[in-house]
Amino acid sequence: MKKVVLAYSGGLDTSCIVRWLKDKGYEIICFVADLGQGLGQGESFEAIEERALAAGASKVYIKDLQDEFIDDFVVPALKANAIYEGKYLLATALGRPLIAKYLVQIAHKEKAQCVAHGCTGKGNDQVRFEVTAGILDPKLEILAPVREWEFKSREEEIEYAMAKNIPIDVTKKKPYSIDRNIWGISIEAGILENLEHEPPEDAYLITKSPAGGTTYPKYIEIYFEKGKPKKIDGKVWKLKDLINHLNVVGGTYGVGRQDLVENRLVGIKSREIYEAPAATILHIAHRELESLVLDRETAHFKEIIALKYSELVYYGLWYSPLKQALDGFVDSTQEFVTGSIKLKLTKGVCAPVSRKSPNSLYKKELSTYGKEDKFNQKLAEGFIKIWGMPYQR
């Protein structure tokens, strides 16, 4: 009997996969990664373990990977300003290579011949899992049941789960596919597939509607040290607690919602909605601080790097040589990214209102139009002539 280690979420797809693989003669070991996804009312990791065992798993591993996820995946992406297609803060994409890493480790420990995931044949996550597993151990067989089985819809999966007495927490009336971790939430399927419909409020989990939210503004000041967030309003926080706090505060003000028709890696367009209050706040603050301390050429080139970095994360190439090389560049740019940014939160908007840094390149005496002005304007004529000289015929 072949052993397979399955990336198990406790959701509909992976719960059905456990039974489906068992019926085909596999021994299934489930791996549940705690990436700070937060569990629903009445849900717990113990309940998820029980569900996996009830579906037919022989063993379940549950690991709290929140700190590793934040330190080794979230922070590097934040420093790089990695945002896919200008809207997606890559929460799910950042979690997949970490989960795949542990799939391989557990497969080695359990002497399993296979690893498996619950991704569809037209999604991005299949690529992220399989490319990462292939880099870390190309000898492992990879199983992707959703690409092979007989079910044609989530409704059919629900019927299968009910017939097999598999406990699930999804209904035909609310068939959203949701992936959540501490950095953000990805939501798809159901009515969201109709591009003419506004996302219904019941699709959102942690953000309040900006239209009905708090009317008075909230000010927060975030302090960074070498590109890494350290304090809120002068108080030092552990990164996990800092992110959780900003998710609550930002969510209260409706900050961090995105509705995106994105270009998937496999070549199709899909509609996803995202919630990422903390990620949105931190990215805005980080970029604002960089604008204060980075010289123009570095700042502009880093925008190009950010675009490529986000693509590599989205494409499942976290462990690629290019991604590792870009990390070296990004880290070098963060040497002077220390200081504080004050932000104003109101009605779904997060806007910087003040900035300060010991490494600021802003010089008021050069920028001012007041009497403190020390800029020698007579030099401008020569500068303009030299600057424009290559374009004169």
Image (cartoon, grey):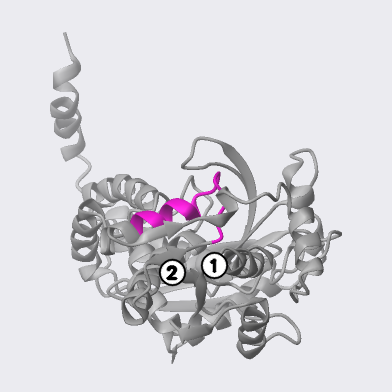
How far apart marks 2 and 1 lie (CA) works out to: 8 Å
Give the x, y percent position of residue 45: 61, 86
Residue 123 drawn in magenta: yes
Give the x, y percent position of residue 93: 46, 59
* Side (left or right) of 108 relative to 231: left
The numbered dot on residue 2 is 2
Packing grade of label 2 (10 A; few <14, some 14-19, many >=20) is few
Q: Name the kind of residue labelled 2 in the image.
A: Lys
Q: Which residues are magenta?
A: 118-132
Q: Depth check: 115 or 378 in front? A: 115
* Side (left or right) of 191 relative to 372: right
Q: Name which residue lies at 18% across and 61% down.
A: 328
Residue 324 drawn in magenta: no
Give the x, y percent position of residue 12: 69, 66
Q: Depth check: 148 or 308 in front? A: 148
Q: Name the kind of residue labelled 1 in the image.
A: Gly
Residue extending furthest toward the top: 393
Packing grade of label 1 (10 A; few <14, some 14-19, many >=20) is few
Q: Is residue 198 above or below residue 249?
A: above
Q: Depth check: 248 or 159 in front? A: 159
Residue 38 appears in the figure = yes
Find disc 1 in the rendering and name its residue: 25
